[in-house]
Image: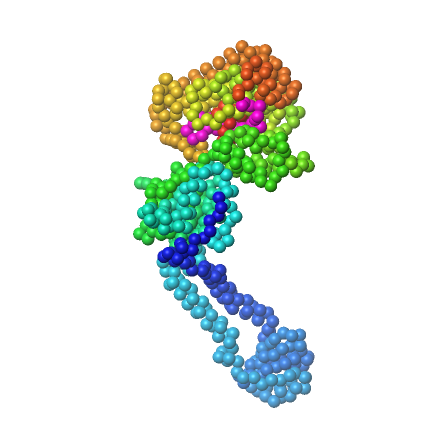
């Protein structure tokens, strides 16, 4: 999108021209005053006392006889000042009886004599300054406090001033052209910018500008990037601030900073305010029985609510905000009139991932055999930040290999490194451990191959990486949004395929299936508790707790909404599903024991086997458009309210990663 030129008609038709911002030193007057106070009362007296000595009359006569006195100024009040031969200043008092004999003695010893006046307080300017300085400083502070009476001492000293970064004449270079995908989100945000630039178009139709737009979505999806693009595109002042910058140790600072931020925005209206991580100040307020009803965070939120839609609405000011925890925001903040629109910025789909990769690969040398479409297809569930990191890791891998050109192998290695960690050599495993890992991974792979609804196998390896000892990769042919019951049952069987392989070949299980069991149990619990796929429990749904975009999104586990008998029934159904899945996996591997042994031997020999070879060994057709184009493993999680895809990671897949299919020991 090309950047729009500034519209002079907007500024000329009743919209006040923003006054120039105050000079920077205005905010630090109290510091300047404090510095002057310290200089006058501590530094100057200390410096003066360090170079000036006080002599009694006997010491003075002794120094005169020793030719240590260079000059003397005798005042009418009997005091005398001057310089010693070493350059130091001195003061002394001369008794009236000294008279002419002292003058003769001074002249005899070569002392330069000067007659002075009385060193009274009225003749000493520095003394006057030292005397009146405190009163002047106190009076100035009193005037500042009176001027900012509504803001208190914090406003007077600048503590309550907003920390927003203002982009006015010089704006960020990011534009909407740098934001790949998310056309719907960009359209809604661009519409607000257009309203501020050309309000007369909307006024003719009687349309009112939205007060606020809330961008929600998982971390790393580009919410802040969209805001930077707005700052780059808009020809209006743009205020950027983080939610945490409002709250500090002083009570009332947050509310004062919100008030100051909106005051500055009104002065420069039309303007846009962007609050990143608004959940830091917009959390739901406490209800009945709250012990801290006047919390600093609540004061800040109350001020924000009043500024967005109060008795004095911020006309010409639009608020953009971003969060990945919308479920904890206060309902009053989300009502129409405040945040009128909620724009979801989800994880990118295949087309958007390809566009994002193309943006991040600008200026980089790519091998002719590298297809970014293949890379995009092999990264389901990656956010924009994940894709940027993938390209950067691939570039680092190319530099490590003394190349300037990025190849498909660089992206393959980078993806392995991001998801699994640094890959180790096979020599870290003992021979019997290597065979056990091969049996485990072969079990996963063959159960997936012989299950019609399971995701296709992309690659099987027994090379350790990070916390995993081996990996079986699956890659969906399409990006699913709904999961059928048959797909879920096949997924459970694939989860337990590794343990089933150990039972069939080795006659016993091992600790390598620990995370398989945890992920299978999690999926089975969702099937019973949330998806209503148990005939014994029936069509009920008790979603698990957690953030919508950070995992979970339902009732908290601590507030279980069902009885103990229901929990026992749920446990029984979960156990039944897992036992049936294990039995089915064991039956599949027993029926194809010869194929299992061949794949185990091939893994021990080759260490890494492509998915096409697994299908060839099993005598099954490779799915169309299938796993031969895959890049690397991908950890699986479900979209909000959806089940996780086939995944088991023995030690390290507890944290949610990108959706896809990854099975490792």
Q: How many marks?
A: 0
Q: In x, y percent, where is residue 619?
A: 57, 13
Task: Pick the quarter of the image with the C terminus.
Answer: top right
Q: Is residue 399 left or right of residue 76?
A: right
Q: Nearer the viewer, residue 48 or 630?
A: 630
Q: Residue at x 56, y 86 (%)?
A: 96
Q: In x, y percent, where is residue 570?
A: 39, 21
Q: Residue at x 51, y 30 (%)?
A: 380
Q: In x, y percent, where is residue 113?
A: 62, 84
Q: Is residue 567 magenta?
A: no
141 up-or-down from 573: above or below? below
Q: Is residue 633 visible?
A: yes
Q: Residue at x 59, y 69 (%)?
A: 50
95 up-or-down from 394: above or below? below
Q: Is residue 299 visible?
A: no
Q: Main secondary structure of the magenta part?
A: loop
Residue 155 lies in what quarter of the image? bottom left
Residue 445 lies in what quarter of the image? top right
Q: How is the image coloured?
A: rainbow
Q: Nearer the viewer, residue 443 or 454?
A: 454
Q: In x, y percent, where is residue 482?
A: 43, 25
Q: Residue at x 45, y 38 (%)?
A: 183
Q: Is residue 639 magenta?
A: yes
| Residue most extreme to the bottom | 100
Magenta segment, which residues? 625-644
Q: Nearer the viewer, residue 94 or 555?
A: 555
Q: Nearer the viewer, residue 492 or 274?
A: 274
């Amino acid at each position: 999108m090309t950047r729009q030129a500034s519209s002079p008609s907007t500024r000329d038709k009743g919209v006040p021209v923003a006054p120039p911002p105050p000079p920077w030193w205005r905010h630090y007057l109290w510091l300047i005053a404090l510095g002057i106070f310290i200089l006058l009362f501590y530094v100057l007296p200390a410096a003066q006392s360090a170079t000036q000595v006080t002599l009694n009359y006997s010491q003075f006569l002794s120094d005169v006889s020793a030719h240590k006195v260079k000059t003397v100024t005798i005042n009418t009040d009997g005091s005398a000042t001057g310089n010693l031969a070493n350059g130091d200043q001195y003061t002394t008092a001369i008794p009236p009886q000294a008279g002419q004999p002292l003058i003769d003695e001074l002249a005899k010893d070569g002392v330069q004599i000067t007659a002075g006046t009385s060193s009274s307080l009225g003749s000493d300017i520095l003394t006057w300054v030292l005397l009146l300085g405190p009163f002047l400083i106190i009076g100035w502070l009193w005037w500042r406090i009176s001027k900012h009476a509504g803001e208190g001492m914090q406003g007077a000293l600048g503590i309550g001033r907003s920390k927003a970064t203002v982009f006015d004449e010089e704006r960020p270079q990011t534009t909407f052209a740098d934001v790949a995908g998310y056309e719907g989100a960009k359209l809604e945000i661009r519409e607000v910018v257009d309203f501020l630039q050309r309000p007369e178009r909307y006024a003719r139709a009687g349309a009112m500008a939205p007060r606020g737009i809330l961008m929600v979505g998982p971390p790393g999806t580009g919410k802040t990037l969209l805001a930077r693009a707005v700052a780059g595109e808009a020809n209006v002042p743009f205020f950027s601030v983080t939610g945490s910058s409002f709250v500090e140790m002083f009570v009332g600072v947050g509310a004062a900073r919100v008030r100051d931020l909106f005051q500055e925005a009104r002065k420069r209206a039309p303007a846009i305010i962007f609050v990143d991580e608004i959940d830091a100040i917009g959390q739901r307020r406490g209800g009945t029985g709250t012990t801290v009803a006047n919390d600093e965070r609540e004061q800040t939120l109350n001020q924000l609510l009043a500024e967005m839609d109060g008795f004095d609405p911020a006309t010409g000011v639009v608020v953009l905000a971003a969060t990945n925890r919308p479920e904890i925001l206060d309902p009053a903040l989300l009502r129409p009139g405040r945040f009128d629109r909620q724009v979801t910025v989800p994880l990118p789909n295949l087309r958007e991932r390809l566009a994002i990769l193309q943006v991040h690969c600008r200026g980089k040398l790519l091998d002719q055999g590298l297809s970014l479409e293949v890379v995009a297809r092999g990264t389901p569930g990656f956010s924009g930040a994940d894709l940027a990191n993938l390209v950067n890791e691939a570039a680092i891998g190319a530099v490590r290999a003394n190349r300037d050109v990025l190849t498909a192998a660089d992206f393959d290695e980078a993806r392995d490194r991001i998801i699994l960690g640094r890959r180790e050599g096979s020599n870290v495993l003992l021979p019997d451990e290597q065979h056990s890992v091969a049996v485990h991974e072969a079990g996963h792979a063959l159960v997936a191959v012989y299950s019609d609804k399971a995701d296709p196998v992309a690659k099987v390896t027994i090379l350790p990486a990070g916390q995993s000892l081996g990996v079986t990769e699956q890659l969906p042919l399409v990006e699913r949004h709904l999961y059928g019951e048959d797909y879920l049952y096949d997924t459970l069987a694939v989860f337990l395929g590794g343990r089933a392989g150990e039972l069939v070949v080795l006659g016993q299980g091992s600790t390598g299936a620990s995370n398989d069991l945890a992920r299978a149990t999690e999926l089975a619990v969702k099937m019973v508790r949330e998806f209503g796929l148990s005939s014994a429990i029936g069509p009920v749904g008790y979603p698990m707790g957690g953030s919508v975009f950070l995992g979970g999104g339902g009732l908290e586990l601590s507030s279980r909404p069902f009885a103990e008998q229901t929990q026992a029934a749920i446990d029984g159904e979960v156990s039944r599903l897992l036992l049936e899945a294990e039995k089915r996996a064991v039956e599949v591997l027993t029926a194809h024991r010869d194929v299992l042994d061949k794949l185990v031997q091939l893994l021990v020999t080759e260490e890494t086997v492509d998915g096409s070879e697994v299908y060839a060994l099993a005598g099954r057709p490779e799915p169309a458009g299938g796993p031969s184009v895959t890049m690397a493993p991908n950890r699986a999680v479900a979209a909000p309210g959806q089940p996780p895809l086939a995944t088991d990671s023995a030690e390290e897949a507890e944290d949610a990663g990108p959706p896809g299919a990854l099975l490792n020991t």
